[in-house]
């Protein structure tokens, strides 16, 4: 289809602004723009249709099943959107005096307190804008703590080889050397490898639990103990919190700090890549280092901001992705103490239900009770038929289902990671199971068909090699 | 001049006792698939036997290239920066770096030995 | 009340049995007993949708919504065309994930490609990424693009937004990079101070200049660019996207990297977020750009297609060697900015810029006549600083009573005012008369320096 620059005509446009009601002041000559600015020249009708077409070429949670492992693509409730559209939130200037923004401070305080209770932490900052940004902030808490104690030898962060790529990347951004430890046979942390890795140079451990293969690490208390005994701190990557919220808390597992993804566990929409929100929680002994403005006081006596005494500074302007926080609070209020464990229990149930049904044909990377997601290993299928995890994923597109996460974690070579979420009706999962089982048969019968999949999407497989070798990353105008 | 090969699939062309060019083998480029970019060291950099001195990017992966020798980078093949596909198309012409003042070289294989080594690795 | 779980209790029981469990407790036996929650969470019970909506309305009502806003400092109250909200509410855009599966994400991918193009057009640069968290984090992430073994120190102007400087400092604490703040003088970055610092530093990596700066004043960006380049460092500009419709582009000023906050492009001020950072650079530095980049290519049949490209730069592939950890970005906000730019067009944006600037000058004159003298005497865009000869709280309260959010009190009892095309002459006249009245009633004695 056409790019927005290829439609419209010179001279078209909308009537948006009134005439200027004061005398005009113009820019000094030497400050003026020299280059022509090419932007679309369109009527409102054309804009509307252009984006409608783009929307039709996009698959969201509301278009169909989206079992994208490790991304928690649950339904995004509408009441949250309503709350975030209220003028009292959208028309609020971030530097408005506190007395004129008491409702916003209360939203922040309620969210911080709720998250502290759900995670078993003592304090939270809402400033980080995404999960990776939360990791960065959490690791800076660890760095601030060691630096404050004058303990400068601690230069290493331990990360299991099954971790999300953001973990080692965040550690590197905090100036840490990354020590990657292999996973044990069962997909969990290899305790001996961990014992060998820790020492006087250990700043901390980053761990996702349930881990990236969807298993709850049964040795979790031993793991955090080993790190603490070496003088390191434990960071909990909350990417998989949807499996355990209301069932178990990172704070009770021995973790010192944690990030949560409001755009996963707390149902705020992902917007095609963001905005997310990645609040960071910590135990009391780290709270003094938190970034940004901390809300103190009570709504009755008045809420106000205060900087933490040894604050690391700011990781973002203002208070984070505030409207995303509003949505998450609306979700937490809806679920309450009963709904939160109900959501996680059903997320885990749905995953195990699909796992067992798919086990009829697919090999599971770890054939045991999973948490909210599970990993299928298609290595054997590929070896036998030539059909890869990628082929099966592309085949699924023709059923109107978003494929599972492919090729992650890296420790499973032909991985498909399935995370159904609690918001899916049983029959939707049954349909997806049937589709995947059909694709398995197809792999045996007609591998070529799957190599050529998808067959019904708006495009076939794109040439990614060509795209990377000769990058075309913007439209070029003729004049 | 016959090429010599390392276990990590680099080739070495010894120009004289202390100077060589280094690239990656046909087997390696085949395993890596279509390459889209290469990161090279700078001229004058010291490189150490067994350490990574460059990396190559395919669409979905990045792989370190290890140095079979210890020495100083005398020259880099800047053509590869614009045309990494040369590594896929003609791996033995697509040298990455020219190294001088070589003080150490790891145990290398002849072409025949390397062929057998790759066959064993594939099995 | 409720958890958005559709399956009935009966279905859940059936599914448990089919999955081989006798109960939820049985299924959760994989969690060690020692860490299982023994008590329910100490939270209120869930609420019905009606109660939640009412509670959120109550919270929103505790905030003061001002009819007219004269405060900027990083959050700008510009006009937002109605089409913007209508488009970003489309559920496909709202509820999709990052476009990893290109074949069913062409819409999002194309919209990002269009955003990249528009940012390149605004800034004059060659390549832009798919977005960053905000302008401040985008600014901070330019530093690792410029630092290498031979270039180690980063420089930033004290006339940049204080929040941006603080975020840069926090990021540099992380990466162990030395960051030097170059002071400002008379509302502009002190060029002599920068020259002296660079003369004494053979390892300078980059210098960040905000244009227009925090006080609204125009810097001599080209001269800074020349100075920085003469010292072998990279020139990074933080820019206001609305101003770029009429101002010299970063490319024309010699910048290697341009960043900024896209909030003025159709995003409500929303108590500070979500906004969107943009980041653009030259072809030469393309591979150093952090974050996602969409590229155009073809599918098997030769159809135009869009994909995430140059992914080997990113954390999911390069892991600890990646220059950034960014994964989620602010895509929906980038889409917002694109729709805004499409609706406004080049002429509409230029008009918004001209009106903002003209009205700011009108207000400054009016405030001067009312006794609030300008602190700086430089060319400026739509923000400016005046003295405040009265207690600023008294002034702000008087304005608030009239539905006006006044300028931002900053250091030394001065005020940073901001005007956009939304502020009418009538609003400004009202502001000026209130300010005059407050001064008349209880103003401190002051001396004019004009």
Image (cartoon, coloured by chain):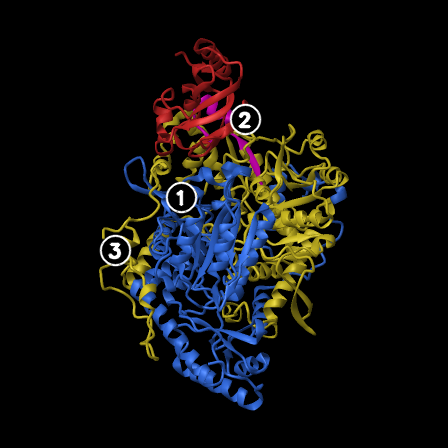
Task: Determine which residue is flagged by label 3.
Answer: A7
Q: Are marks 1 and 3 on the same chain?
A: no
Q: Which circle, 1 or 3, is nearer the viewer?
A: 1
Compared to C263, does A182 lie above or below? above
Q: Give how far apart the Cα atoms at labels 1 and 3 are.
A: 28 Å
Residue C286 is marked as 1
Q: Residue A380 in magenta? A: yes
Residue A101 is marked as none
Q: What secondary structure is found at the residue carrying circle 2?
A: loop
- Quarter assignment of residue C381: bottom left
Q: Which chain is assigned red?
A: B
Q: Position of residue B24 (x, y in %)?
A: 43, 22
Q: Give how far apart the Cα atoms at labels 2 and 1 are.
A: 27 Å
Whether residue A421 is visible here, answered yes or no, is yes
Q: Which circle, 2 or 3, is nearer the viewer?
A: 2
Q: Which circle, 2 or 1, is nearer the viewer?
A: 2
Q: What secondary structure is found at the residue carrying circle 3?
A: loop
Question: Quick one: B10 or A439, which is closer to the camera?
Answer: B10
- Quarter assignment of residue A290: bottom right
Question: Numbered disc 2: what chain?
Answer: B
Task: Determine which residue is flagged by label 2.
Answer: B51
Q: Which chain is assigned yellow?
A: A
Number of other residues with Cα within 10 Å of mark 3, as a class: few under 14, some 14 to 19, many 20 or more: some
Question: Quick one: A170 or A84, which is closer to the camera?
Answer: A170
Q: Give how far apart the Cα atoms at labels 2 and 3 are.
A: 53 Å
Q: Position of residue C374 (x, y in %)?
A: 47, 77
Question: Numbered disc 1: what chain?
Answer: C
Q: Which chain is assigned blue?
A: C
Q: Is mark 1 in CB contact (under 8 Å) with mark 3?
A: no
Question: Quick one: C260 or A110, which is closer to the camera?
Answer: C260
Compared to C207, does C54 lie above or below? below
Q: Position of residue A99 (x, y in %)?
A: 61, 74
């Amino acid at each position: 289809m056409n790019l927005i620059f290829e439609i419209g005509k010179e001279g078209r446009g909308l009537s948006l602004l009134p005439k200027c009601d004061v005398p005009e002041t113009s820019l000094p000559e030497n400050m003026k723009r020299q280059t022509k600015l090419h932007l679309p020249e369109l009527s409102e009708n054309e804009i509307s249709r252009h984006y409608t077409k783009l929307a039709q070429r996009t698959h969201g949670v509301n278009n169909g099943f989206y079992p994208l492992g490790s991304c928690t693509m649950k339904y995004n409730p509408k009441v949250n959107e309503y709350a975030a559209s209220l003028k009292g939130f959208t028309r609020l200037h971030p530097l408005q005096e506190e007395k004129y923004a008491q409702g916003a401070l209360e939203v922040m305080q309620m969210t911080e307190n709720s998250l502290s209770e759900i995670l078993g932490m003592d304090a939270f900052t809402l400033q980080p804008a995404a999960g990776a940004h939360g990791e960065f902030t959490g690791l800076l808490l660890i760095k601030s703590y060691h630096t404050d104690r004058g303990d400068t030898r601690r230069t290493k962060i331990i990360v299991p080889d099954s971790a999300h790529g953001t973990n080692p990347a965040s550690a590197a951004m905090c100036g840490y050397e990354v020590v990657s430890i292999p996973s044990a046979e069962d997909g969990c942390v290899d305790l001996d490898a961990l014992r060998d890795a820790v020492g006087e140079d250990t700043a901390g451990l980053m761990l996702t639990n349930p881990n990236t293969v969807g298993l709850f690490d049964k040795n979790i208390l031993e793991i955090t103990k080993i790190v603490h005994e070496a003088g390191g701190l434990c960071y909990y990557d909350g990417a998989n919190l949807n499996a355990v919220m209301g069932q178990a808390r990172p704070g009770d597992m021995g973790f010192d700090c944690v990030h949560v993804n409001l755009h996963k566990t707390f149902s705020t929409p992902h917007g095609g890549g963001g905005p997310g929100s990645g609040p960071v929680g910590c135990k009391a002994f780290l709270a003094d280092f938190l970034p940004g403005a901390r809300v103190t006081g009570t709504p009755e006596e008045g809420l106000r901001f205060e900087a933490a005494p040894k604050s690391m500074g700011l990781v973002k302007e203002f208070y984070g992705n505030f409207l995303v926080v509003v949505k998450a609070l609306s979700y937490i209020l809806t679920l309450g103490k009963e709904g939160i464990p109900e959501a996680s229990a059903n997320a885990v149930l749905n995953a195990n239900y699909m796992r067992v049904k798919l086990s009829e044909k697919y090999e599971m990377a770890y054939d045991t009770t999973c948490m909210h997601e599970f990993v299928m290993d298609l290595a054997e299928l590929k070896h036998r038929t030539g059909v890869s995890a990628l082929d099966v994923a592309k085949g699924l597109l023709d059923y109107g289902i978003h494929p599972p996460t492919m090729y992650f974690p890296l420790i499973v070579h032909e991985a498909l990671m399935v995370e159904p979420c609690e918001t899916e009706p049983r029959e939707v999962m049954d349909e997806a199971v049937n589709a995947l089982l059909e694709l398995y048969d197809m792999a045996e019968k007609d591998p070529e068909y799957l190599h050529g999949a998808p067959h019904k999407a708006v495009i076939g497989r794109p040439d990614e090699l060509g795209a990377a070798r000769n990058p075309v990353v913007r439209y070029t105008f003729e004049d | 001049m016959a090429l010599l090969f390392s276990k990590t699939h680099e080739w070495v062309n010894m120009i004289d006792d202390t100077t060589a060019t280094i690239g990656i083998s046909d087997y390696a480029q085949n395993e890596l698939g279509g390459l889209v970019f290469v990161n090279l060291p700078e001229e004058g950099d010291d490189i150490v036997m067994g350490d990574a001195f460059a990396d190559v990017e395919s669409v979905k992966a990045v792989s370190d290239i290890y140095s079979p020798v210890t020495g100083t980078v005398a020259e880099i093949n800047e053509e590869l920066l614009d045309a990494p596909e040369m590594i896929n198309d003609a791996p033995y012409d697509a040298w990455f770096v020219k190294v001088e003042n070589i003080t150490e070289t790891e145990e290398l294989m002849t072409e025949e030995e390397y062929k057998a080594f790759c066959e064993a690795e594939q099995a | 009340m409720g958890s958005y779980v559709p399956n009935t209790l009966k279905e859940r029981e059936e599914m448990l049995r089919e999955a081989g469990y006798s109960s939820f407790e049985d299924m959760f036996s994989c969690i060690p007993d020692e860490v299982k929650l023994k008590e329910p969470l100490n939270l209120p019970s869930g609420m019905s949708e009606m109660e939640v909506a009412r509670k959120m309305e109550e919270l929103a009502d505790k905030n003061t919504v001002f009819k007219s806003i004269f405060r900027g400092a990083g959050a700008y109250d510009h006009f937002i065309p109605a089409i913007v909200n209508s488009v970003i509410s489309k559920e496909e855009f709202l509820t999709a994930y990052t476009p990893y599966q290109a074949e069913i994400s062409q819409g999002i991918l194309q919209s990002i490609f269009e955003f990249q193009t528009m940012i390149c057009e605004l800034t004059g640069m060659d390549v832009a990424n798919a977005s960053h968290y905000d302008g401040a984090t985008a600014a901070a992430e330019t530093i690792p693009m410029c630092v290498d073994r031979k270039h180690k120190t980063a420089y930033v102007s004290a006339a940049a937004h204080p929040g941006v400087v603080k975020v840069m400092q926090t990021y540099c604490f992380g990466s162990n990079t030395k960051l030097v703040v170059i002071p400002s003088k008379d509302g502009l970055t002190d060029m002599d101070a920068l020259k002296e610092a660079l003369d004494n530093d053979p390892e300078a990596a980059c210098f960040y200049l905000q244009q227009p700066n925090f006080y609204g004043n125009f810097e001599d960006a080209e001269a800074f660019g020349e100075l920085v380049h003469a010292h072998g460092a990279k020139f990074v500009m933080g820019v206001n996207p609305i101003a770029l419709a009429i101002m010299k582009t970063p490319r024309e000023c010699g910048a290697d990297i341009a960043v900024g906050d896209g909030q003025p492009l159709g995003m409500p001020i929303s108590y500070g977020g979500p906004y969107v950072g943009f980041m653009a650079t030259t072809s030469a530095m393309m591979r150093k750009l952090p974050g996602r980049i969409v590229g155009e290519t073809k599918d098997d049949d030769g159809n135009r297609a869009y994909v995430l490209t140059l992914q080997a730069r990113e954390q999911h592939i390069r892991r600890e060697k990646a220059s950034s950890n960014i994964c989620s970005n602010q895509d929906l906000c980038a889409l917002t900015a694109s729709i805004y730019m499409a609706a406004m067009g080049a002429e509409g944006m230029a008009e918004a810029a001209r009106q903002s600037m003209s009205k700011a000058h009108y207000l400054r004159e009016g405030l001067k006549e009312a006794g609030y003298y300008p602190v700086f005497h430089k060319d400026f865009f739509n923000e400016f600083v005046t003295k405040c000869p009265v207690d600023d709280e008294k002034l702000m309260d008087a304005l608030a009573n009239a539905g006006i959010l006044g300028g931002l009190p900053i250091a030394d009892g001065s005020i940073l005012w901001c005007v956009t095309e939304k502020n009418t002459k009538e609003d400004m006249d009202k502001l000026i008369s209130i300010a005059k009245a407050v001064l008349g009633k209880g103003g401190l004695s002051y001396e004019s320096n004009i």
